[in-house]
Image (cartoon, coloured by chain):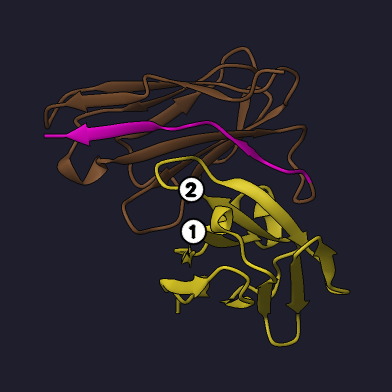
Chain colours: A brown, B yellow
Amino acid sequence: GAGVSQTPSNKVTEKGKYVELRCDPISGHTALYWYRQSLGQGPEFLIYFQGTGAADDSGLPNDRFFAVRPEGSVSTLKIQRTERGDSAVYLCASSGSVSHYNEQFFGPGTRLTVL
Amino acid sequence: RKEVEQDPGPFNVPEGATVAFNCTYSNSASQSFFWYRQDCRKEPKLLMSVYSSGNEDGRFTAQLNRASQYISLLIRDSKLSDSATYLCVVSGGGGSQGNLIFGKGTKLSVKP
């Protein structure tokens, strides 16, 4: 079956602009996670959803970052007033439920470059 | 102290070698432990979960020592295709069991 998909695969934007990154989880997966990975680092947790609600957004670095999942499937990560330090690969993952036993399946990521 | 620490490497080994990676974690409340593999410019993929009793999957063996908060991965008979970055991963503690905390990764390069 189809895995997690993310669009766009690459996004180049200018400092100060607004961007939206989209994630389509595996069909039927109720839990969805966003991470970001900077060069030479492991993925860093941002936020996760159980259904439509954000169960834990403690990883969002500041209020310029926001994510939604209005129908409990597709999610959008929104970044306002982008800064050069936001440049990273943004990874989305999904799992059958929010449980530390369930494998998280990752999408290919969106590579964001802020000029 | 970082939450998950691992030697970044690189580990350069010949085919057929045995190589071991180690990792320590700081949150004693973490419940689940994993090794993920990440190829260059690709997404992480689960290699194996790690259990206190130790577990083996073919050439790969993982061990967990909760008292020392230490996780290991042993790869026997290395193949060229094992070349990748290996990420040590633990679940968040307490109410954050759903999110994963990743180490920086250990890079392995297997040479002919």
Q: Residue furthest front?
A: B112
Can you tell which quarter of the image residue A69 is in? Answer: top right
Q: Residue furthest top?
A: A71
Tell me the tag on residue B56.
Answer: none
Disc 2: which residue: B39
- Depth check: give the residue in front, A113 or B48: B48
> Measuring 36% from the left and 47% from the top, which residue is drawn there?
A61
- The verdict on residue B66 being magenta is no
**From the viewer's perspective, is B101 left or right of B28?**
left
**Where does the magenta region start and end?**
A102-115
Can residue A64 be seen at all in this image of the molecule?
Answer: yes
Q: Position of residue A95 (x, y in %)?
A: 71, 34
Disc 1: which residue: B85
Can you tell which quarter of the image residue A102 is in? Answer: top right
Q: Position of residue A94 (x, y in %)?
A: 64, 32
Q: Amino acid at mark 2?
A: Asp
What is the distance, in whole Å, between disc 1 and disc 2 at their CAs? Answer: 6 Å
> Contact (CB < 8 A) between labels 1 and 2?
yes
